[in-house]
Every structure is written in C-alpha cells, then in structure tokens.
Image (cartoon, rainbow, N blue to C red):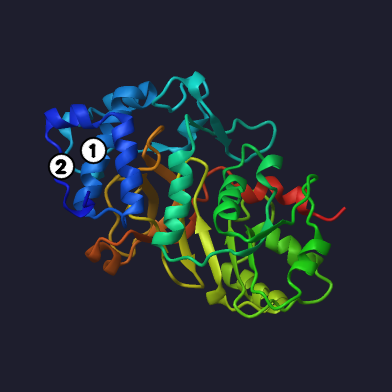
Amino acid sequence: MHFQDIAAPTADASLIMSHPLSIEHDLHSAMAGGGLGDGAFNALALRVFKHQFDNNTAYQNHCKALGVAPENLTHWHEIPAVTTDAFKFVECPLVTFPIGQTQKTFLTSGTTSELKGCHHFPSLDLYDRSITASWQELALPRPENSIFLTPEPGHAPHSSLSHMMGVLSDTHSRKSIWAVDASGRLDMESITAAVTGNRPVALLGTALAYLHLFEQLTHPLTLPPGSWAMETGGYKGTMRQLEKGDLYRMFTNKLGLAPDSIINEYSMTELSSQFYTRGLAHPHTGPSWTRVRVINPFTETDALAGEPGHLVIYDLANLHSVMAIRTQDLASRSGADLADGRNAFTLLGRDPSALPRGCSRAADHQLRPS
C-alpha cells in the first residue's frame, strides 16, 4: 500500500476502517514503508481519532465538552488535545481497551508522594516498532557497542526510557553495558573499561546521568574515533541548572566528543514516539507518523513563526490512549518549518509555571556517589 496517496475515508468507510487492528496494521505498514505524507497522515489521524472517541470514555467526554465529534472534523489540526496531567486521573484512565487487558504500564517520574501519570498498553508491538522505525527513518546511528547510563529494564519496569534503551539494545547492539547498577549508582569501573579499545562506543543516558559521570571522573576519557552520545531529559526539580552549551562543552572536555557527535532525544511517558536533534542550534524532528503544533497558550491558535508557545504533539503510535498531547514545554517553529510543513520545532524549555517532572529528576539522588 502506498501511503502517500491515501485519500481521506468517507464517513461510511471510516466506520469499518476505524477498527484498531486495521489501524495498527496500517501504522505498521507505514513505519515499514517509508512513512506517511501529509494526506496519508491526515486520513489515518481521522481514523485514529474516531477510534479513540468511540472507545475512550474519558477522552470522549472531553471532546463532547468542546463540541467536537468525528463527523465534524476534516483535518488533524482540529483534533482536541489533552494535557499530560490527564494521564494522572486513575479513576478515568485514558485507554481504548478494557483496563483489565493492560499488558504494560509506564509511569511518569516523581516523588513517592506525587500522583504519577499512567500510560497503559494492551501490547507493546506498536510502541516498540515506533522506536526502531524512528531510528531508521531519521537516519540515526546504530548503537552497536553501547553503554547505557540508565537502569536496565528489569530494574525499572515502569520506566519508558529504560524500556526504550532495552529495545535499542536488543535490536541494534552487539554488546551492551548497563552502567547504572541495581541500587541506582553509576558503575564507573565498567564505564572506564568499556571505552578502552579501538571500537567506537555509544553512550546513552539522561543529562543528569552524564553530569554525575563528569563529576565522578578523576581524569578525562578519550573515546575511540566514531563514538557518539545520546542525552535526554533536563534538570527541573533537581536544584541543578546547566545550559545545553555548557553541558556539551563538558562532553568535549571529559569525553572528547564534539557537539555534532551528541544527539538529544525529546519524548515523554505520555507519548509513544520520540523526537531528535543533533548538536547545538538545530530543531528537533520526529518520525512521519507524528505532527507538531506550537500554540499561543491564551488564544489556542497556532503561534506565528518564531513566536514561543506550548508544544502540542500528535502521535499516531498512541493508538491505545490519546494521539493528541498538549505538553507543558515551550517551543517555536521557524518560517521554513511552517512553509514546508516540516515536522520540526525548536525546544525553548519548560513552562516556568509547570510542575517539575522528568526522568532526570527521579534518578538525581540515586546517581550521587555514596
């Protein structure tokens, strides 16, 4: 099936085509076949919305309150988004399937006293496929000789980040070292031993994990030629602040990595797909089964080119929950991004009025040396 040429379904056809197995099959095909063009994305997004409206009671109530129903929409821009806080309402979970059929739940990070967001899945087939297909579609380097600065999945079963690292390890790595032990501490001996030799290494972890690594190094490590790193997460709620340029200078000084050898990943527990950028001063780009908007928080309309606003992400891989997520992050889009319809944005940071969150905060105290 050639997804670039799919026309929007008719009302009668959508009643048949909105079945989740049919949609998931088409999503798998799109991920395997080079992705979705604008027309194909719009058609599939409308099918996903109808499925979620029909089967996700909490989301349907939200849409009805806004006066929105599937028969009234013609474009994915019109699909209502929910905030990330909506995933915290345990009594009305955002699912399109019986909650008893949940096979996996990822939880947002936070302290033990906080109400955490829950993202439930009846299967991780589509979720895992989104990870590997994004890596291929966005031409990211394969982490063949990997050092993961996160707990391995078995030690963090509710962490979407650890699960993602596990998928990359299983599908791309010839050799993987999990350098955060069961107690949450960095295994400095394993890290030092792993980077000695001629084979390029890939380091993958949170920004805070790298900060702890840099602080605990007694002398700089020179990584083999061709090595690279991926970092994700921030510092909110940890009482630490470091500009991205300062962090990347530490990568250079401590590991010998130039900024263009460093990939930043942007995602969250409430999403099933990730966005990536390389080096400094470049926008994040997502796979073709996602789209982004930057909206004025007061008017709810699209922000002008270069104007900051709240980032809204449409992720078709969120088939079993809600595809449209309004984040509490600030972003902007360039005139070129808007003119070309590119799936890209420039991340500006966390809305200062938002509550702290993120995978980095949960691990901060654990990564400190004893």
Could one spot residue 29 in this view of the protein?
Answer: yes
Is residue 354 rendered to the left or right of residue 320? right
Residue 68, position as x, y percentages in the image: 23, 30
Number of dots carrying numbers: 2
Disc 2 from disc 1: Cα separation: 8 Å
Which amino acid lies under the numbered mark 1 shown in the image of this protein? Answer: Leu
Could one spot residue 290 in this view of the protein?
Answer: no
Looking at the image, residue 299 lies above or below residue 99: below
Which amino acid lies under the numbered mark 2 shown in the image of this protein? Answer: Ala
> Mark 2–mark 1 contact, CB under 8 Å?
yes
Decide which of 200, 360 is in the foreground and name it. Answer: 200
- Where is mark 2, residue-wise? 8
Looking at the image, residue 63 lies above or below residue 325: above
Decide which of 317, 284 is in the foreground and name it. Answer: 317
Check residue 46 in the rendering and tell me which mark sits there, or answer none. 1
Residue 197, position as x, y percentages in the image: 74, 76
Residue 172 image-quadrant placement: bottom right
Residue 217 image-quadrant placement: bottom right
Check residue 269 in the rendering and tell me which mark sits there, or answer none. none
Residue 38, position as x, y percentages in the image: 22, 53
Looking at the image, residue 77 lies above or below residue 71: below
Residue furthest to the front in view is 174
